[in-house]
Image: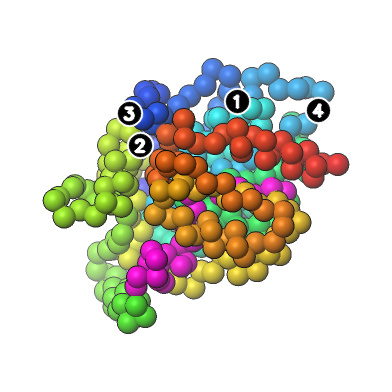
Amino acid sequence: MSATAGEAFATAPPKSKPLANGADNFYTSDLVTVRKVSFKNQYQMTVAGNLFVPKAPDRQKRSPAIVVGHPMGAVKEQSANLYATKMAEQGFVTLSLDLPFWGGSEGQPRNAVSPDMYAESFSVAVDFLGNQSFVDPQQIGAIGVCGSGSFVISAAKIDPRMKAIATVSMYDMGAANRNALNHSQTVEQRKQIIATAAAQRQIEFNGGAVQYTGGTVLQLTADTHPIQREFFDFYRTPRGEFTPRGASARTTTQPTLTSNVKFMNFYPFNDIETISPRPMLFITGDQAHSKEFSEDAYKRAAEPKELHIVPGAGHVDLYDRVPLIPFDKLTAFFNKHLARAST
């Protein structure tokens, strides 16, 4: 995808078609209007998004709004649009966005990792929403799904305009790369990853091909890890598969190898307590392999805070399995705290 490729060049998502166990990633609603939007961040890079507006808003007052960020390696058509649509049905103006280097947003090379740029995208989304005549700039919140949960925390620490913050199936992308799940990666293994990335930098500087790392496997084998199977069921099947035009289906979800080590210097939970007194809601499944990150953030955060654990839900279940996603909890959280912020 070129640096200037935008939403207009993305392939259209398939029609909403509920799948097994309530999966409905491509859900659409007759109660909501959707408009493609784009705007420049502070670094003059175009950020692409979808703006969702309830069809019957209260014209007598400005509406509360919510920014929604997609999972790491995904694009807004994967999980973020679903959350934005469902929350718009509840009366919020919502904005799903593509993080820089992904989907319809600018940035080269494609699939690059830049935690600072990712956090910046939440702030520029607040800039955009606060400039809309039908949005109350004092009532803007944010939802981060998976990796975006750590990016929105990073953003909220230095942007008090985000009045209420919720995360769902959060990954601390810094800790996940430094330590792996359950602190299963040694320091020596970490150093080897860093050394490999440094060697690849030199190769690419000398004209070699870009290499990718991590992401979701392209096919299952008898030895495929259960967590990879969980991601495969979403990213590599009609349930949630989406490839923007100009990108390759073989590299969706996969960050560039040389940039992925940027996460080693990413500590989103440091100073998380300074977000207080703005409220935080951490949602995770009781079966989620990522539960440790929500529990860690909750422990470190100051009041008001809440950890909401969904019975029977795994990590990816909360991307799109509508019966499991606690939209009522999210609605009550933002109704309460955004209204309080306005007063």
Query: In the rendered structure, are the residues bearing label 2 and label 1 in contact, judged by CB atoms less than 8 Å apart?
Result: no
- In the image, the segment drawn in magenta is 163-185
Please report the residue visible at 56 percent of the width from the left and 43 percent of the height from the top.
68
Please report the residue visible at 47 percent of the width from the left and 67 percent of the height from the top.
174
Could you say which quadrant of the image residue 202 lies in? bottom left
Please report the residue visible at 53 percent of the width from the left and 53 percent of the height from the top.
149
Given this view, does label 4 or label 1 mark the residue nearer the observer?
1
In this rendering, is residue 116 above or below 98?
below
Q: Is residue 267 left or right of residue 343?
A: left
Query: In the rendered structure, are the residues bearing label 2 and label 4 in contact, judged by CB atoms less than 8 Å apart?
Result: no
In primary-sequence order, the first of circles 2 and 4 is 4
What's the amino acid at mark 1?
A: Glu
Q: CA distance from mark 4 to mark 1?
A: 17 Å
**Residue tagged 2:** 240
What's the amino acid at mark 2?
A: Gly
Q: CA distance from mark 4 to mark 3?
A: 40 Å
